[in-house]
Image: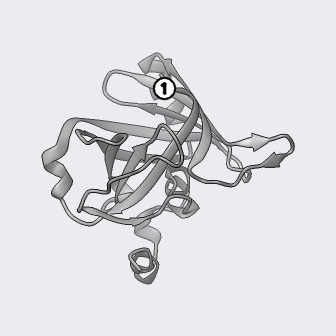
Amino acid sequence: MAMGLEIERRFLVRTTGWQDQVRTSAHLSQGYINISSHGVTTRVRHNHDRGWLTLKAPVAVGAATVTAPIRRWEFEYAIPLGDAKCLLEHCLHRISKERHMLKLTGGEWVVDCFADANHGLVLAEVELERPDADLCLPPWIGPEVTGNGRLSNAALARHPWSQWLEQEKQALWR
């Protein structure tokens, strides 16, 4: 269970060079109970034996929202697997992915290989202690996409990778 401030950077993945760094893997199914226009999401997620309910929100200072996409609030709670499966059935927007936790230094690295309507999209994420933490990028990392709202899991649940035009996909690599 992780609660509090999430500090995360996201990248496209160029090659399969990350595969020899896999520590563990899990299939994740997740759905969105709510996706607001203000960046607040409520999602349900489960793997084969656990369920979670998660709320994510932009970092706000007073009435002004801080727009730095690297930081956001994340409140995640374990829920019974049966509850998670039931909630997921009622979610209109869903994604499925294989998450690979990696043995790398400099933060908690994962690679997500998306499935179904998002098949073919592979993203790496690293959770950091501080937004300004030094980061040594592995050679298989592609362009940074932190803050690209179209590549958030919530956005991919609504407008999947398979619906993107080829030139939209290619533009991410420039």
Q: Residue at x 20, y 52 (%)?
A: 18
Residue 98 pos. (x, y %)? 29, 44
If the image is split into quadrants, where does the C terminus sit? bottom left
Q: Is 67 positioned to the left or the right of 69 in the image?
A: right
Q: Mark 1 is on which residue type?
A: Trp
In depth, the one of 75 and 117 nearer the eye is: 75
Query: Crowding at label 1, few (<14), some or many (≥20) Cα neighbours within 10 Å?
Result: some
Residue 75 in which image quadrant: top right
Q: Residue at x 47, y 22 (%)?
A: 1
- In the displayed image of the protein, which residue is found farthest to the bottom? 167
- In the displayed image of the protein, which residue is found farthest to the top? 80
Residue 124 pos. (x, y %)? 35, 53
Residue 46 pos. (x, y %)? 41, 30
Q: Which residue is mark 1?
A: 52
Q: Is 136 positioned to the left or the right of 76 in the image?
A: left
Q: Residue at x 32, y 54 (%)?
A: 136
- In the displayed image of the protein, which residue is found farthest to the right? 63
The colour mode here is one colour
In depth, the one of 39 and 117 nearer the eye is: 39
In the rendered image of this protein, does residue 165 appear above or below residue 80? below
Residue 52 pos. (x, y %)? 48, 26
Q: Residue at x 39, y 79 (%)?
A: 170
Numbered circles on residues, count = 1
Q: Name the secondary structure under disc 1.
A: strand
